[in-house]
Image (cartoon, rainbow, N blue to C red):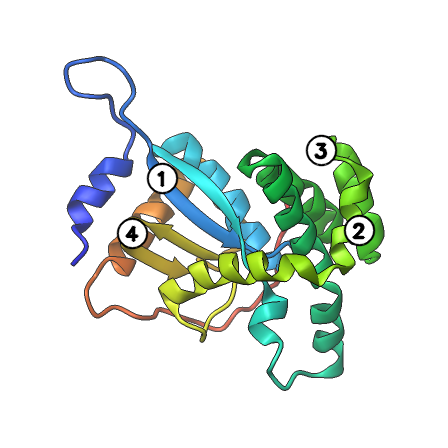
Amino acid sequence: MPNMTATATRTSKATARGTGRPAKKAAVRMWFDPACPWAWMTSRWLMEVEQVRDIEVDWRVMSLSVLNEKRDLDKGYRKLMDVSWGPVRVIIAAQEQYGDKVVKPLYDAMGTRIHLQKQRDRDAIIAESLEEVGLPEELAKAAHQKKYDRALRRSHREGIDLVGTDVGTPVIALDDIAFFGPVVTPAPKGEAAGRLWDGCLLVAGTPGFYEIKRTRTQGPIFD
């Protein structure tokens, strides 16, 4: 059973007892797909949380294409899923060759083009993002290579197994507390971001708690 009080205390801004040094940051994992605008909103929020709570985010890949590959979808969403294999394959390939440090910069570069600049050509998005991050253009070939799918599916499964297949991206985990979301717009900033983080840990860490939900009345606000 999660110790909610201990977890919340560990992620508040503090100093190590008797040393005056900052306390060790709690390791938070977030699984994302660059195609998802709501995951993008959540990632911007988590970046704010890093500034006001003692957490450090480990950015990981999941895939809406994997999640939905056997589902009956309308033509428009199926087309989106078909083109969404490319970016996640490229991030996985880059991670394998250059390490975890390239995951977040690539996500930022791709997400900016997809969600802020509204670019549609995934091959162009990938090429421009690789150039921005300083990675070889040859990595773009991975977008059309299924050999990276095993590692992609493994990363996806690590996240989705924590919360179940009834949800999508993003997935966030801290120790044995994991949850889908939060779905929020615009992304809270400053201490408001920290308070939302505290609340997420509280409800997600409550034994037997599963869901709070209300109808969305607006789309993502990218500010």
Q: Quadrant of the C terminus?
A: top right
Q: Measure the alpha-carbon separation of dots 2 and 1.
A: 32 Å
Cβ atoms at labels 2 and 1 below 8 Å apart:
no
Q: Residues within 10 Å of mark 2 (few under 14, many from 20)?
A: some
Residue 201 appearing in the image: yes
Mark 2 or 1, closer to the camera: 2
Upstream in the sequence, badge 4 or badge 2?
2
Q: Quadrant of the N terminus?
A: bottom left
**Residue 32 placed where, x, y %?**
55, 54
Callout 1, which amino acid?
Ala
**Residue 217 placed where, x, y %?**
56, 68
Upstream in the sequence, badge 3 or badge 2?
3
Mark 1 or 4, closer to the camera: 1
- Above or below residue 159? Residue 12 is above
Query: Residue tagged by mark 2?
Result: 141
Q: Measure the alpha-carbon separation of dots 3 and 2.
A: 16 Å
The front one of 194 and 86 is 86
Left or right of 14, for residue 164? right
Residue farthest along the front direction in this orientation: 147
Mark 4 or 2, closer to the camera: 2
Q: Measure the alpha-carbon separation of dots 4 and 2.
A: 40 Å
Residue 219 disc label: none
Upstream in the sequence, badge 1 or badge 4?
1
Cβ atoms at labels 4 and 3 below 8 Å apart:
no
Query: Residue tagged by mark 3?
Result: 133
Query: Residue tagged by mark 4?
Result: 201
Left or right of 12, for residue 138? right
> Which residue lies at the image location 76% right of the left edge and 44% below the top edge?
139
> Which residue lies at the image location 36% right of the left edge and 39% below the top edge?
27
Upstream in the sequence, badge 4 or badge 3?
3
Q: Measure the alpha-carbon separation of dots 1 and 3.
A: 24 Å
